[in-house]
Amino acid sequence: MFADIVFFFVSLSMTLGVSMEFVSVTLLVVAACLTWATVWFWRTARPEPESLAPLEIMSQREFAGADEESRKKMLNSVRAVPVIDASQSSIETQ
């Protein structure tokens, strides 16, 4: 496969009448542009929202084996604003 690619560029340069140095420099420029685009993309990519943090905890083995109270503590530890326990809110409203 690599030989086919090399053969393609050699035949292209012979057909167009350009030197192999020009083809080499052009490919290096294309590689540099792709590298720059990759770095730019990774630096400007949107960060993960905080609202998805509980999903990461739910995928862990410790979460699956924990009791209900431990699960609530684990989820509230990663949330931006901990959720009020449903049993406490029903007592407060009465």
Image (cartoon, helix red, strand yellow):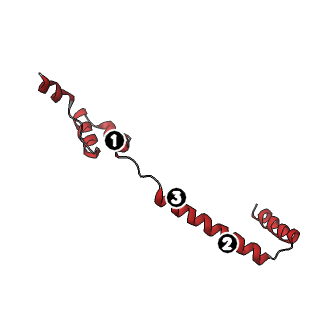
Q: Nearer the viewer, residue 34 or 61?
A: 34
Q: Percent x, y for residue 70?
A: 23, 38
Badge 2: few (under 14), some or many (20 or more) residues near its Cα, within 10 Å?
few
Would you say the residues marked 3 and 1 are in contact, meaning their CB atoms lie under 8 Å apart?
no
3D distance between C-alphas at marks 3 and 2: 20 Å
Q: Which of label 1 and label 2 is nearer to you? A: 2
Mark with earlier residue (3, 2)? 2
The span from disc 1 to disc 2 (Cα, nearest Å) is 44 Å
Q: Where's residue 89, x and y in %? A: 17, 28
Q: Are there few (<14), some (14-19), or many (20+) residues within 10 Å of tag 3?
A: few
Residue denoted by label 3: 41
User: What amino acid is labelled 3 in the image?
Assistant: Phe
Reading the image, the residue beneath label 2 is 28
The amino acid at mark 1 is Pro
Residue 26: x %, y % from top left: 71, 71
Disc ID at residue 54:
1
